[in-house]
Structures are given as structure tokens and as C-alpha cells.
């Protein structure tokens, strides 16, 4: 019922981290072809916000999220709230971990391409 809150929360945290890293990277210049950490964090943000939006849309579609207070239908009773927290701890955490794992694979692929580009740049020099 509220599993989208977990990846959404992680996305907010990584967005703040991206802004901090981007501010520190502004004055850094390098000759080596490399993707910045802030760009890589941006990839993670997009994955997390996209996954969170997909889960939120699914819950709106099924009527579990409403535009009036308390916004989550599971907050109407204690039994439903317990089920909601269980879903958050299973589905929400799973979605956040899956998005982070996909991001890790993306980083590994990007690293391979960065090494290849650095090698080609060294051969040209």
C-alpha cells in the first residue's frame, strides 16, 4: 500500500548527495575521459524515482492511495497498517535494492567503457 515510499525516500537522499557532489565537482578538470560521480548518482535517482512512480501509480490504480486524508487506505485500521508496514519492508525494500543493483551493473559497464576510452586516449598520445 505504501511500498513506493522506500525507493522514493532513497531517491530523495541520493538527490541531496548528487547536489553536494555536483557542487564539489564544479572546479575539477581532468584530461581522462570519465563520467562524473554526480552523473552516475543521477542515473540512480532516475531509476529510483521511476520505480517509485511505477509503484505509486499501481497503488493509485487499485484505489489504495486516495486524494483525501489519510491518503493511504491502509491507515484506516491497525490491521491494515500492519499489512502496509510488512509490504513496505518487503516490496519497498526489494524495489530499492533492485534499482540499486541495476545501477551497480550500469556502473560496471560504464567502468569498462571508461577503461577502454582511457586506453585509446593513451595510445593516441
Image (cartoon, rainbow, N blue to C red):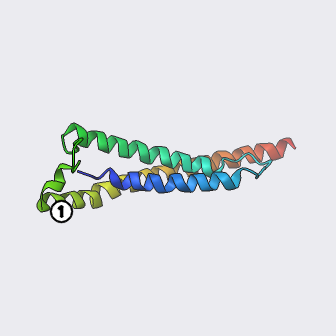
Residue 2 in picture, x, y percent from top left: 27, 52
Q: Is residue 57 left or right of residue 123?
A: left
**Which residue shows up at 55% across the image and 46% down it?**
42
Which residue position is annotated with label 1? 82
**Which residue shows up at 50% across the image and 50% down it?**
103
Residue 53 in picture, x, y percent from top left: 36, 42
Of the pair 73 and 33, the residue shown nearer to us: 73
Counting labels gives: 1
Query: Is residue 99 in view from this perspective?
Result: yes
**Which residue shows up at 22% across the image and 44% down it?**
68
Q: Give SS at disc 1.
A: helix
**Which residue shows up at 58% across the image and 49% down it?**
40
Residue farthest top in this picture = 61
* Mark 1 surroundings: few (<14), some (14-19) or many (≥20) residues within 10 A: few
Query: Is residue 100 in view from this perspective?
Result: no
Q: Is residue 114 left or right of residue 44?
A: right
Of the pair 82 and 110, the residue shown nearer to us: 82
Where 58 sits versus 27, above or below?
above
Residue 31 in picture, x, y percent from top left: 80, 47
Of the pair 54 and 27, the residue shown nearer to us: 27
The picture quadrant where one finds residue 92 is bottom left
Quarter of the image that includes the C terminus: top right
Amino acid at each position: 500500500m505504501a511500498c513506493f515510499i522506500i525507493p522514493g525516500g532513497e531517491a530523495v537522499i541520493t538527490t541531496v548527495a548528487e547536489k553536494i557532489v555536483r557542487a564539489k565537482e564544479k572546479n575539477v578538470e581532468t584530461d581522462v575521459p570519465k563520467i562524473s560521480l554526480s552523473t552516475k548518482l543521477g542515473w540512480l535517482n532516475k531509476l529510483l524515482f521511476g520505480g517509485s512512480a511505477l509503484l505509486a501509480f499501481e497503488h493509485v490504480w487499485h484505489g489504495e492511495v486516495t486524494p483525501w486524508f489519510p491518503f493511504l487506505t491502509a491507515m484506516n485500521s491497525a490491521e491494515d497498517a500492519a499489512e502496509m508496514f510488512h509490504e513496505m519492508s518487503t516490496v519497498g525494500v526489494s524495489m530499492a535494492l533492485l534499482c540499486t543493483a541495476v545501477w551497480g551493473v550500469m556502473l560496471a559497464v560504464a567502468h569498462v567503457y571508461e577503461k577502454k576510452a582511457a586506453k585509446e586516449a593513451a595510445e593516441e598520445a
